[in-house]
Image (cartoon, rainbow, N blue to C red):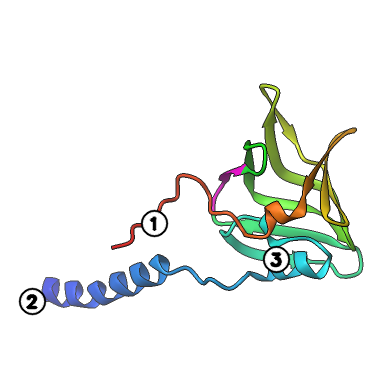
Amino acid sequence: MARTLVFFTILPLVFIISVSSANPDPTPSEAHKELIKFGFPIGLLPKNVNGYSLNTSSGHFVVSLGDKCRITLPPDNYLATYSKKITGKIVENRIAELDGISVRAFFKWWGITGIRSSGENLVFEVGMVTAKYPSKNFHESPECEGKKHSSS
């Protein structure tokens, strides 16, 4: 009798958890909204943002992801990885002191240290080297690769 009671008590909880995780909230997170406020497209961050904090006086921020994330960045299909925690400093049209995002280029992993929004373009900084890409390539927040959701 006790086993049956435990089973029927836990079963609805499992169902509620699986339904809520199967339908992620399509609205942008606070971190995505802050990107827009500072002049950046939301596609700079993947969809799996769990938390975000910003010191409004210094611009220092912390973005927490549910897990590490791999995505392919447009338009040149560079593989990028996001750590569980991304930190940096954001001001109008500029992200500096960035830590937690790396990109694979020339057979090596490089940390993206800053991003500037310059008109219709984004300028990515990797140390002293920069690369410019159209910001229209980042209008949608990407899904992490390997995180397929079933449609049933």
Horizontally, is 140 left or right of 12 in the view?
A: right
Cβ atoms under marks 3 and 2 closer than 8 Å: no
Are the residues flagged by discs 2 and 1 in contact, CB closer than 8 Å? no
Residue 28, horizontal then vertical, whole percent: 62, 70
User: Where does the N terminus fall, quadrant-wise?
Assistant: bottom left
- The residue under the point 84% across, 66% down is 38
**Of the two numbered discs 3 and 1 in the rendering, the one whose residue sits closer to the viewer:** 1
* SS category of the residue bearing label 3: helix
Question: Which sits in the foreground, 12 or 136?
Answer: 136
Q: Position of residue 130 (x, y in %)?
A: 86, 37
Helix, strand, or loop for circle 2?
A: loop
Residue bearing mark 2: 1
Magenta-highlighted residues: 67-72
Quadrant placement of the C terminus? bottom left
The reply to whether the magenta stretch includes residue 102 is: no
Counting residues from the N terminus, which is met first, the one under dot 3 or under dot 2? Answer: 2
Whole-angstrom CA distance, mark 3 to mark 1, is 23 Å
Q: Quadrant of residue 49?
A: bottom right
Q: Taken as a whole, is the magenta stretch helix, strand or loop? A: strand
Percent coordinates x, y for residue 33 in the rendering: 72, 70
Q: Which residue is mark 3?
A: 31
